[in-house]
């Protein structure tokens, strides 16, 4: 992932670790989570927040899926596809899971390993 690679490079620079030292990711990151993991968690947390805000317009369009045009594998990845992939919950059950605040908090917390929170 380009985002993680850039973040790793910035952490090396901040910690004054040269690439010639061949430091492991564990050494570079320490207890920090990968940036992509944190982004995944925050995306899911925000989606749950938006889903529960029934008075806002975003709750009605959050889980909208466009009609598939052409072949199934040629369409672009949608926000709902991303939530489905990241949470491991099928699209059919996604809204009910997000409406249950306790369940969704557990799902979001599981997206980042416990040792790096």
Image (cartoon, grey):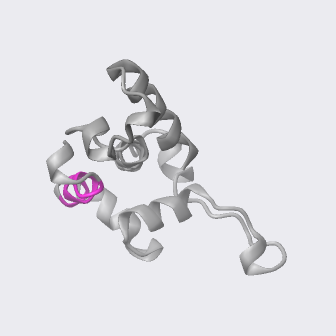
Query: What span is in magenta?
Result: 103-111
Please check the rendered image and state whether residue 32 is part of the magenta-colored stretch, yes or no: no
Is 41 placed above or below 12 here?
below
Q: Position of residue 29 (x, y in %)?
A: 29, 38
Taking the spot 39% from the left edge, 42% from the top edge, the residue there is: 22
List the single residue furthest toward the bottom: 71
104 and 16: which is toward the camera? 16
Q: Is residue 28 visible?
A: yes
| Outermost residue, front side | 20
Q: Is residue 32 visible?
A: no
Instruction: Give the quarter of the image for residue 18.
Output: top left
Q: Nearer the viewer, residue 35 or 19?
A: 19
Tell me if residue 12 comes above or below residue 27 in the rendering.
above
Q: Mainly helix, strand or loop, the magenta region?
A: helix
So how many labels did they put on this image?
Answer: 0
Quarter occupied by residue 15 = top left
| Residue 105 lies within the magenta run | yes
In this picture, residue 110 sits left or right of residue 21: left
Could you tell me which residue is drawn at 22 percent across and 38 percent down?
30
Q: Residue at x 64, y 61 (%)?
A: 77
- Measured from the top left, where is residue 74 in percent x and y? 78, 72
In this rendered view, identify the residue nearer to me: 47 or 87.
Answer: 87
Above or below for 32 versus 105: above
List x then y, in percent, for residue 103: 20, 61
Vertical side of 90 occupied by 45: above or below: above
Locate residue 60 relative to residue 97 in the image: left or right. right
Q: Nearer the viewer, residue 111 or 92?
A: 111
Q: Quadrant of the C terminus?
A: top left
Would residue 81 be found to the left or right of residue 46 on screen?
A: right
**Coordinates of residue 44 in the picture (x, y in percent):** 38, 50
The residue sitting at 34% across, 40% down in the picture is: 23
């Amino acid at each position: 992932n380009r985002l993680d690679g850039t973040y790793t490079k910035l952490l090396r620079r901040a910690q004054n670790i040269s690439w010639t030292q061949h430091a492991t990711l564990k050494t570079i990151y320490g207890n920090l989570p990968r940036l992509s993991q944190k982004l995944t968690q925050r995306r899911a947390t925000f989606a749950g927040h938006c889903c529960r805000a029934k008075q806002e317009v975003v709750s009605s369009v959050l889980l909208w899926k466009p009609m598939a045009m052409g072949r199934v594998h040629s369409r672009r990845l949608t926000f709902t596809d991303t939530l489905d992939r990241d949470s491991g919950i099928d699209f059919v059950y996604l809204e009910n899971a997000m409406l249950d605040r306790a369940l969704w908090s557990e799902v979001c917390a599981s997206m980042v390993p416990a040792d790096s929170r």
